[in-house]
Image: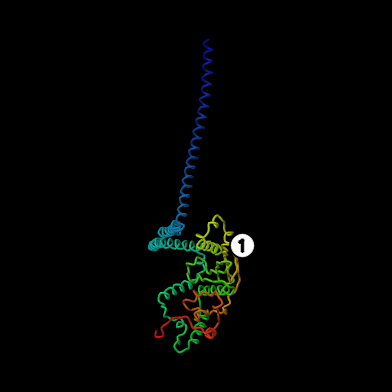
Amino acid sequence: MKLFGISLFKEKQESLEILYKDLKRIQQEINQSSRENLKTLEKIQLAKKDLSDRQKSVELLKKELSEGNPYLARIIADFYHYRDIKVAEYLRSKKYPAIKASEKVKDYASENRELRRKFKLTYNRIKLYEEVFPFISDLEPDDIDFILEQKKKKGKISDNDDPVREYVPEYDKLTEEERNQRALNRYLKSKKSNWEVGKMYERYVGYLYESKGYKVEYVGIEKGFEDLGRDLICRNAKETLVIQCKYWASHKEIREAHINQLYGTTVKHFIDEFKNRSEKLKNTLFPDLLARDEVKIKPVFFTSTKLSKTAEDFAIALGIQIIQEHPFDQNYPMIKCNLNSQTGEKIYHLPIDQQYDNVLMQNEERIYVRTVKEAMELGCRRAYRWNPNK
């Protein structure tokens, strides 16, 4: 009986030892798994933090987009600053140290950091403005100088300043016909900025539509940068054309940004004209709305060069009429004559006169001629008020 008890005890002991080993092995596996899970959890938390930081950066960039991305500009500036500091450290710690050079590099690094930040900030803002207002990318340095100079002149010119004097120094020695014709000739031959030539092209396109019976409003010339891309508004009894003109060199292509701007400004013109007119026009999608009989507004892109394939696709999809590769005939008649049969008044305007673009040529009593002599033979006098004693 005693032997049986000992034997039973040993069996139980062996079973417990086996069970203990199993429990120990399981505990080790649990501990290992816990450590791995903890590492995984830490990785997940780090990944979440990284993702959160990135999302915050993206949101910050989105928020600052309209300000030219100062956050991004600062990051780029910091990167170059770090690189410059590393150069300074190398100069200080190399085999034959260049202490003074190292200090100068450090000084320049801080200065360049701020300059790079400002440069990148300005660059980003300009690119943003070019996306929103595509015409800005068309401007050359001489155009900007010309526009600023014209603004200065506009503030100084009075109603009694005859612009002919600017082109004809020998003004007082000539007859009216001679000095006015000479001024016109010199104006046409004078060196012009791209911006000036572009405005002349707008006038030429306006002349073409006036010849077809349209009443033309020269919005681009009258309002300048406030025209929102509407250079000409041409109206007749059937339709209204919103025209954007581009006189570019033949090797340049019109991009889709200009097409989008024209379409957007056409929508703005529709809103200005029809927002208070009819409830029936509501809940109708563009461009079908523009083609409706009671609206009949058509955007037209008129250019001396050609459109890119993408720009053409955009124009077709948006219902924009394209007139491309149309040359500029600089010999077209530019002198505007107004023969008022009711008042008997007959006057003419030169392209250099301040009110030239405000003269509407919508009926048979208003015609174009090429020379001052032709205008005077029609009995016209120049529509200009000036003081001969000045």
Q: Is residue 371 above or below residue 261?
A: below
Q: Is residue 294 above or below residue 334?
A: above
Q: Position of residue 106 (x, y in %)?
A: 39, 60
- At label 1, which amino acid type do we have? Ile
Q: Position of residue 13 (x, y in %)?
A: 51, 20
Residue 86 appears in the rendering: no
Q: Residues within 10 Å of mark 1 (few under 14, many from 20)?
A: few
- In depth, the one of 76 and 339 nearer the eye is 339
Quadrant where the C terminus sits is bottom left
Q: Position of residue 47 (x, y in %)?
A: 49, 45
At horizontal 52% and vertical 24% (from top left) the residue drawn is: 19
Q: Which residue is mark 1?
A: 316
At horizontal 54% and vertical 12% (from top left) the residue drawn is: 4
Describe residue 242's horizontal placement relative to residue 64 as left or right.
right
Secondary structure, mark 1, is helix
Q: Position of residue 58 (x, y in %)?
A: 48, 52
Seen as rendered, the residue at the extreme bottom is 173
- In depth, the one of 320 and 325 nearer the eye is 320
Q: Quadrant of residue 112?
A: bottom left
Seen as rendered, the residue at the extreme top is 1
